[in-house]
Amino acid sequence: MTVFLLPLAPYLLWLVYAALFHPVPLAYNWRSIWVRKAGTLSTVGAIAIVVMIFVVVLSMAQGVSRAYVKSGRDDQVIVLRQNARVEMMSSVTLAQARLISTHPLVARDAYGPLFTEDIIVSKQLPLADGTGSLTVTVRGTTLAGARMRSQVSLTAGRWFRPGLSEAVVPQSMQRRYRGVELGGTITMGGRTWAVVGVFDGSGSVYDSEIWTEVADLRQAYKRYGMDSSVAVRLRSPEDVPAFVRDMEKDVRLKLEAKPEPTYFAELGDAGKPMQVLGQIITAILTVGAVFAAMNTMYAAVAGRTSEIGTLRAIGFRRREILASFQWEAILLTTLGGILGAALSLLFNGIKSGGVNMKTWSDVGYAFAVTPGLMAEGVVFSILMGIAGGFLPAWRASRIPVTEAMRG
Amino acid sequence: MAAPEVTVRLKGLAKSYWRGSLEIPVLTGIDLEIPKGGYYALMGPSGSGKTTLLNLIAGIDRPTGGELEVCGHALNALDDDELAGWRSRNVGFIFQNYNLIPVLDAFENVELPLLLSDMSRGERRDRVERALRLVNLTDRMRNYPRQLSGGQEQRVAIARAIVHDPELLVADEPTGALDARNAEEALVLLEHLNQELGKTIVLVTHDPKAAQHARFQIHLEKGVLDRTIEVHDRPGLPRIPGGGA
Amino acid sequence: MKFLSLVLRSLFRSKRRTVLTVLSLAVSVFLIALLQSLLGTMDSLTVSGGSGTRLVVQDKASFTNVIPQSYANFLRSQPEIENFTAFQWFGGEYQDPRNFFANFAVEPETYLDVYREECNLPSIPPGQVRDFKRDGNACIVGQELADRFGWKLGDVVPLRSSIFNITLRLNVRIIFKGKRKSDEMYLAFNIRQLQEAVPWMKGRVGAFTVRARNAADIPRLCDRIDRNFANSAQETLSITENAFNLNMMKMLGDYSTMVHSITGAVLMAILIVTANTMAMAIRERTTQISTMRALGFRSSQILSLLMAEGLLLSLMGSGLGIVMAILAADVAAKVGGSILPWMADFIITGETLLLCVLITLALGLLSTFAPAYRASRRPITDGLRAL
């Protein structure tokens, strides 16, 4: 949004200059705005709604990509079959996994190497509101895997134990789906899994996954000797390029290693269509809002014809009148922008979900109304003020001095 | 039903406004009869209540006390819609600022009161043309108000006031916005309407010249009738400017 | 009727204001019409020519899992079933990962019959049908898709799938014309190609599409099929094809909530804008309104004249918006269809038009009523004083 301001920079600089050095006082505009309350409120309201839509839709897109960004760690690498792109389509044999786990760069903690082999399957879960069901990701992982995902922390119950067909479920899924509460059971792979724990993935994609013990899942789905992916933590982020090179050099493996941030960023492209849609919607609405602002400003100019004539008679020059009314328009729309940005905060943190077209499974995310987005919304309203105010301000500046004499 | 001999009959008419709990009397105890075909000028200083009295007579305002019977109807007994219908049949209005509808041309402005009747299109056209001929503006009937001079605008307004053939014409400072020549023309026109068409005219003015055209001058002072003067030395009735009827 | 010209001309007394308001309304209604039609188009696509008589048998846990092809034996023994075909989502890409379109592996022997409405079987030359069934590498593509990539009969199309990590080279044997453009946006080929190239697909299929003799039999069939496999290694979930499609659409996310929320917010904004315009238009006509009332217009007549004006304003705005939307729909279908197949059928739906009519009425009435009512009840003498 800010880029649009650049071509306007000279004009804006001149406006600032005009306001500072040959001012029709801004207080004059500020008070005039409040003289025409109905017109002002309607314009402020309309602009506020457009800015709100703008910020909220982008906060959705932001929320999606944030869920993915939060999921990666820069010292961790995910290893997939070549060209697999997503874990679900990948396969890694146990033999390959053994080889990877022995790589010297893999970090260790008190319990052993920070290495996990995961299986990804999917499961159709009924939605809590009864409107149908969606496919969610089920991750068979290890306790090491649970430790490696540092965003994830247990909030109730305990972690799964090997051999008992147990599952842990994210807190955020509780409201969205039926039958995933602590003590509940989930049927998959011909087995019944007991929900023994609830975890919080702090907004990462793990908040949209059910976790079980990998060996149990392997058995249930008869995937002997074939897992989906391997993830490792390295001793430091600097080791990542070396490790990735090693993986790709090893022709026995035919594997592809990706730093987690890269992997998740690719998945996060899923937020793109929403972002594009949001931009199209905003672009269309902006046209409408600019017309509305123009209407209000033309009315303001028409209602103050003799006032403007008087200002000219006093000695203000045309360009100062132009600047004055341009400022008035900017003040007006910026009020709307600030209001709209404030209103969008009401949506912050609201949870929603959508299916990632790359993994075919449901991913929850929260609207992320960031200060950056809100600032963009306000900048946007300033642009609307410039666009909507210029013509009326130009007209005001053309009003002849003689109008001062008319009633 | 035979037309009543009296067009306006006021008995103990009073009108006050309230500023909060404070009652401000504008008119008190007005007794007045204006015969059919009469030509009366209401005069008095600002705030004497002459416009209020005119509004009451014209049925666009309601008294707070007393009785008023205009054109054979006791106006107090009519509800707002009946009063509107009554005005559309019995009263013609002439305003200081003409009050023409800017988006309608002269013809359409004159036609406006007829739209409230169930007259056919052709009948309306005849009537409008006749009224415009009377004020000598047939050549300007497709002009919009902003294309007309002040004098012409007022003549269109007068045509609008008579097009539906009302018994009563009310005029509030009809010459107030006109120069001397146009004012004189308008006054002559009113006098014709009074003498030849028998319209009862009530005129509010503070211009003594204009009041001189009326047959009686009613002077109001602080909301009460001060005196009624018959006008003897009225100017002779010249021809309507440019011919006409 | 005799007042129509008065209403029209009053509306255009301030041309610029009216034009700006109309344009402002038009772009907003334009947006609403497009967004709502987007939802409507998505909904309409859950139903296609023969979908009412078909059901889908898939793995109970997830439609992404495969099921044994041997389940066909049970299906074959059901008298209510007319025909069925197996299919598997291939997820293949042509030349570039961005060239996304739907492609499946199917059983050529039965596929054309099960989907005879969608591929318009009677219109396909018998020679092409024979080639498609005989050639193991054959594929069938829709006209729209063929046009997009410039494929002709006999062309070889290499498709690479990242799901199966293979590339298949397929011969175009049928190019069909469907009833809807979105029906022409896919490619299907012989599932044996996939089963031979991918070891774990041997003897497995993604799902079965079953065509019932009678739509009324479908619930009973679903029930019987699922009961039959209830205690087997892989349980099944049988649902009508319409429900299956609905699930697929649902996966696109909660767009309907988003669209409805945006519609609501935009309506709010245009209501404010229109109300402001009408308030301005009425305020500056106080004297005129009082004059008309003095001439004998009743309050109710004044009110209806003003309301007519508001309605006309909103009618012009939304009318223009709808016309713009209808003109843009073709462009949206062309451009959108190359990214999302179902967008090829994008049209402004009847429901959307109805909604726009309702919006127009509501907008005109709500925006004007308050100022118009106030103006029509104002004491006449007040207005005449406001000279």
Image: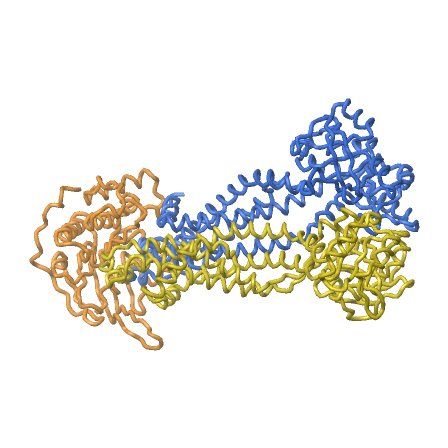
Chain colours: A yellow, B orange, C blue
Please tell me in which quadrant of the rendered image residue B228 appears. bottom left
Q: Is residue B74 visible?
A: no
Pick the front one: B211 or B47:
B47
For the residue pair A339 and C36, the one nearer the viewer reads as A339
Does A272 sit left or right of A287 as displayed? right
Q: Position of residue A393 (x, y in %)?
A: 35, 56
Q: Could you tell me which quadrant the C terminus of chain B lies in?
A: top left
At 48% from the left and 43% from the top, the residue drawn is: C320
Q: Which residue does the image show at 71% across and 52% down from the upper left?
A: A356
Residue placed furthest toward the bottom = B21
- Please tell me whether residue C126 is drawn above or below residue C181 in the rendered image: above
Q: In the rendered view, would you say A121 is above or below B56?
A: above
Q: Could you say where residue B217 lies in the image, as x and y percent from the top left?
A: 15, 62
In the image: residue A212, left or right of residue A202:
right
Question: Where on the picture, by quarter, is residue B176?
Answer: bottom left
Q: Is A209 above or below relative to B239?
A: below
Does A295 sit left or right of C331 as displayed? left
**Residue B22 picture location, percent across and down:** 32, 77
Could you say where residue C100 lies in the image, as x and y percent from the top left? 69, 41
In this rendering, would A161 be left or right of A305? right
Picture layout, residue B70 above or below residue C145: below
Whether residue C113 can be seen here: yes
Along the line of sight, the residue nearer the viewer: C120 or A61? A61
Looking at the rendered structure, the number of numbered marks drawn on it comes to: 0
